[in-house]
C-alpha cells in the first residue's frame, strides 16, 4: 500500500484514518467517511481502486469536481475518465469501451448517468467499488440536496457484492443517518476524523466601516502578494463594489454570484482556478465546485449566518495543508440585518439560534478554534495558538465613563435611535438626520469626540455583548437600555471593556511574504532546509508555464506545498526531485528535468 501511495501520489505516509479506510474497503466492506475539506478523502477510494481488479465507479455531483479529480489523476499517470453530459457522444463511447476492456481504473460519473447506465454499462464492466463523493447531497436536511442522489439505493440491490464508500465533509448526525439509510449501506463502519484544520489561522476585526475594510483588505492582500484568495460578501452588489475597489488598486479580481450568466460564472471560476485572477469576490453561491488546493486565504466581508456556512467557506483555504489565513469582519450593522432576516424567515428560532452561535464566535475572547470545534461536538484540551485571541489575549480597562456617555445619549433621545445616529451624536456630527431631530441640542452631543467612530462601533458591540443595551428589531432597531446598563449609567456598577488594538503598523512591518512553514519530517534529511524566496518565485513561474502548455490548473501540475519543499530543500538531481513528498513517479519523469535545471541555477 505504501509503495503504491509513493509511486502514484508521491506521498510517504498516510494521513489519519486513510490506511484504516483503505484496508476496510479492500476487505469488501462498506464505509462512511467523514473528514473535513482537505482531509484527504480522495486517496481513500483511489488507492483501493488502483489495488483492485476492474474499474471504480465514483459518483460526483458536479462536472467541475469530476474534471478536477480526473485531471489530478491523469497528471499522476493514472487511467481515469469522467462520463457526463458535457462530453461528446464519441468521447463517452470511447470511455465506455475503455471501461469494458478494463483499461480505466476510475470512472467518474454524474448520478443521472449512473442511474441511466445501471442496467447497461455497469452490467458490462468489472466494478471494483462504488464511491459516493459529496454524499451529503443525499440528505434533504443538508445544504446541497440533490434529488437524484436519493435513488442510489439501487446500487446495493443490483450489485450486492460491490463495496460502497460514501464520503462527505458534512458531519452532522442527521445527514450521517440519512446517508446510511438511503444508500442501504450494509453495517457500514463510520470513520469520523477530527474536523480541526490547524493550518487555518482565524481572526476577526470588529466595528470596521466600509473605508476601513477596504484599507484592511488592501493591506492584507499586499501581505499575500500573488496568493489566491476568496472574499465572501453578503450581497451581489457588494461583490461587485469590492471587486471594483480591488481592480482600481491593481489587484486582479473576478466577481461570482448567482445573478451572472452560467458562462460568466464559469469564466470567473476558471480564471481563478488557473491563477489568471488572484481574488474572487463572491456570494455563498461560490465554492462547491472548487477543489483548488492553493487557496491561501478567505475573507468574510460580512458576518455569515451560521457557523456551518462559515466553516465550510473558510475550509476552502489551505486544502494542501499549508498555513492559510482567514479574516472575518464583524459589524453591528450586519448583525442587525441578519437578525432581521432570521426573524422573518420561516424557521425563526433555529435561524436565530444559529446566528447567535456565529455571533459568539465573532465576539469570543477565548480561543476561537475551541468555539468552532465545540460547535461540531469535539472536545478540546488546549488553546490553538493560531487564532487572534490566542496570539493577542484581550486586555481590559475600566470603560465605565465611555459606557456612561453612550448610555446617557441613548436616554436623552428617549431610546429612539439606532447605532449610526448614536455614533453621530457622540462624535458631534452635524449630520442631516441629527439636525432634523434637533439632537445637536442634547447635552451629550459631542461628548465622545475624542474616540474615533470605528472605536465607538467596537465599544458598542462590546456593550451589546455585555448586555448593557438591547436592539429592538421590531422598532427600527432602536437601542433600549437594560437594567444592567442602568446600573452602569447610574454609577452602581463598573464596566470593563476590552482594549482595541489597531495593527496597521504591524502590516507595514510584515510586508515581506511569510515563509510557509513546512514540517521538518517532510523534508529530505540530507538536503538543505532554508527557503529561498526568489527560487520559489522562479519555480512558480515555471509551473505556470508548464500548466498553460497543458491547459491544466497550476496546482495540478505541482501543489504549492511541493513548490515550497523544492525551494527549501533544493534537489539538484532527478532522483532527489522524486524523493520530495507529493511527487509521483510519473511527475518525476515528466517534470524532473526542467525543475532541477531551474534549481541548479540558484545553487
Ligand atoms: P478532500 O477531498 O478530503 O477535501 P483531498 O483528497 O483533495 O481532500 O486531499 C487534500 C490534499 O491533501 C490533496 O492535495 C492531497 O493530494 C493531499 N493528501 C492526501 N493524502 C495525503 C497524504 N497521505 N500525504 C500527504 N498529502 C496528502
Ligand atoms: Zn486559539
Image (tube, rainbow, N blue to C red):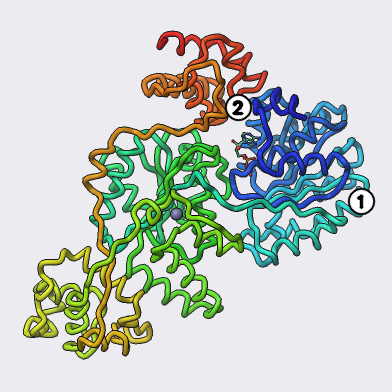
In the foreground, 188 or 182: 188
| Quarter residue 312 falls in | bottom right
Ligand 1 quadrant assignment: top right
Is 83 positioned to the left or the right of 338 in the image? right
Q: Residue at x 55, y 59 (%)?
A: 373
| Comes first in the chain, label 2 or label 1 | 1
Is 310 positioned to the left or the right of 208 in the image? right
Q: Is mark 2 within 8 Å of ligand 1?
A: yes
Q: Quadrant of the C terminus?
A: top left
Q: Quadrant of the N terminus?
A: top right
| Quarter residue 218 falls in | top left
In the foreground, 152 or 296: 296
What is the C-alpha distance between the residues marked 2 and 1? 38 Å
Q: Residue at x 86, y 57 (%)?
A: 187
Q: What percent of the width, then of the height, locates residue 589?
A: 63, 13
Dot label at residue 582 = 2
Q: What percent of the width, then of the height, locates residue 210?
A: 26, 58
Amino acid at each position: 500500500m505504501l509503495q503504491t501511495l509513493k509511486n502514484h501520489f508521491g506521498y510517504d505516509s498516510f494521513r489519519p484514518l486513510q490506511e484504516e479506510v483503505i484496508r476496510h474497503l479492500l476487505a469488501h466492506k462498506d464505509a462512511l467517511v467523514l473528514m473535513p475539506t482537505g482531509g484527504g478523502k480522495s486517496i481513500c477510494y483511489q488507492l483501493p481502486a488502483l489495488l483492485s481488479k476492474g474499474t471504480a465507479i465514483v459518483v460526483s455531483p458536479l462536472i467541475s469536481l469530476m474534471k478536477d479529480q480526473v485531471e489530478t489523476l491523469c497528471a499522476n499517470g493514472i487511467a481515469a475518465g469522467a462520463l457526463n453530459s458535457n462530453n461528446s457522444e464519441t468521447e463517452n463511447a470511447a470511455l465506455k469501451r475503455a471501461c469494458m476492456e478494463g483499461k480505466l481504473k476510475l470512472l467518474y460519473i454524474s448520478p443521472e448517468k449512473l442511474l441511466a447506465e445501471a442496467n447497461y454499462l455497469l452490467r458490462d464492466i468489472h466494478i471494483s467499488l462504488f464511491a459516493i463523493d459529496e454524499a451529503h447531497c443525499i440528505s434533504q436536511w443538508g445544504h446541497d440536496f440533490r434529488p437524484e442522489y436519493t435513488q442510489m439505493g439501487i446500487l446495493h440491490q443490483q450489485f450486492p457484492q460491490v463495496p460502497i464508500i460514501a464520503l462527505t465533509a458534512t458531519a452532522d448526525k442527521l445527514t450521517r443517518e440519512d446517508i446510511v439509510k438511503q444508500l442501504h449501506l450494509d453495517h457500514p463502519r463510520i470513520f469520523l476524523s477530527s474536523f480541526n484544520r490547524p493550518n487555518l489561522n482565524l481572526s476577526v476585526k470588529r466595528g470596521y466601516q466600509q473605508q476601513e475594510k477596504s484599507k484592511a483588505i488592501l493591506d492584507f492582500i499586499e501581505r499575500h502578494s500573488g496568493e489566491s484568495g476568496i472574499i465572501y460578501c453578503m450581497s451581489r452588489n457588494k461583490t461587485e463594489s469590492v471587486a471594483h475597489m480591488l481592480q482600481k488598486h491593481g489587484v486582479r479580481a473576478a466577481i461570482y454570484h448567482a445573478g451572472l450568466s452560467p458562462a460568466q460564472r464559469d469564466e470567473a471560476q476558471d480564471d481563478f482556478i488557473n491563477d489568471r485572477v488572484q481574488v474572487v469576490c463572491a456570494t455563498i453561491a461560490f465554492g462547491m465546485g472548487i477543489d483548488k488546493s492553493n487557496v491561501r486565504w478567505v475573507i468574510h466581508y460580512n458576518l455569515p449566518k451560521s457557523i456551518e456556512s462559515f466553516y465550510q467557506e473558510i475550509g476552502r483555504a489551505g486544502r494542501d495543508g499549508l498555513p492559510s489565513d482567514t479574516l472575518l469582519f464583524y459589524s453591528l450593522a450586519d448583525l442587525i440585518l441578519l437578525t432581521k432576516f432570521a426573524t422573518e424567515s420561516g424557521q425563526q428560532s433555529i435561524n436565530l439560534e444559529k446566528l447567535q452561535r456565529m455571533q459568539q464566535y465573532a465576539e469570543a475572547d477565548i480561543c476561537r478554534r475551541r468555539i468552532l470545534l465545540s460547535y461540531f461536538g469535539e472536545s478540546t484540551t488546549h488553546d490553538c495558538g493560531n487564532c487572534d485571541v490566542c496570539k493577542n489575549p484581550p486586555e481590559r480597562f475600566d470603560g465605565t465613563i465611555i459606557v456612561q456617555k453612550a448610555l446617557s445619549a441613548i436616554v436623552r433621545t428617549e431610546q429612539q435611535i439606532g447605532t449610526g445616529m448614536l455614533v453621530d451624536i457622540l462624535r458631534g456630527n452635524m449630520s442631516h438626520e441629527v439636525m432634523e431631530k434637533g439632537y445637536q441640542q442634547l447635552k451629550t452631543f459631542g461628548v465622545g469626540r475624542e474616540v474615533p467612530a470605528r472605536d465607538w462601533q467596537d465599544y458598542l458591540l462590546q456593550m451589546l455583548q455585555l448586555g448593557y443595551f438591547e436592539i429592538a428589531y421590531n422598532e427600527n432597531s432602536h437601542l433600549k437600555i437594560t437594567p444592567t446598563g442602568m446600573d452602569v449609567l447610574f454609577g452602581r456598577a463598573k464596566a470593563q471593556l476590552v482594549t482595541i488594538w489597531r495593527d496597521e503598523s504591524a502590516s507595514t512591518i510584515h510586508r515581506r511574504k511569510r515563509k510557509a512553514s513546512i514540517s521538518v519530517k517532510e523534508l529530505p534529511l540530507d538536503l538543505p532546509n532554508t527557503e529561498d524566496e526568489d527560487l520559489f518565485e522562479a519555480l512558480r513561474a515555471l509551473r505556470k508555464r508548464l500548466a498553460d502548455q497543458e491547459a491544466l490548473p497550476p496546482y495540478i501540475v505541482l501543489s504549492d506545498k511541493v513548490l515550497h519543499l523544492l525551494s527549501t530543500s533544493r534537489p539538484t538531481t532527478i532522483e532527489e526531485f522524486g524523493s520530495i513528498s507529493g511527487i509521483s513517479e510519473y511527475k518525476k519523469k515528466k517534470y524532473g528535468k526542467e525543475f532541477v535545471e531551474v534549481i541548479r541555477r540558484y545553487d
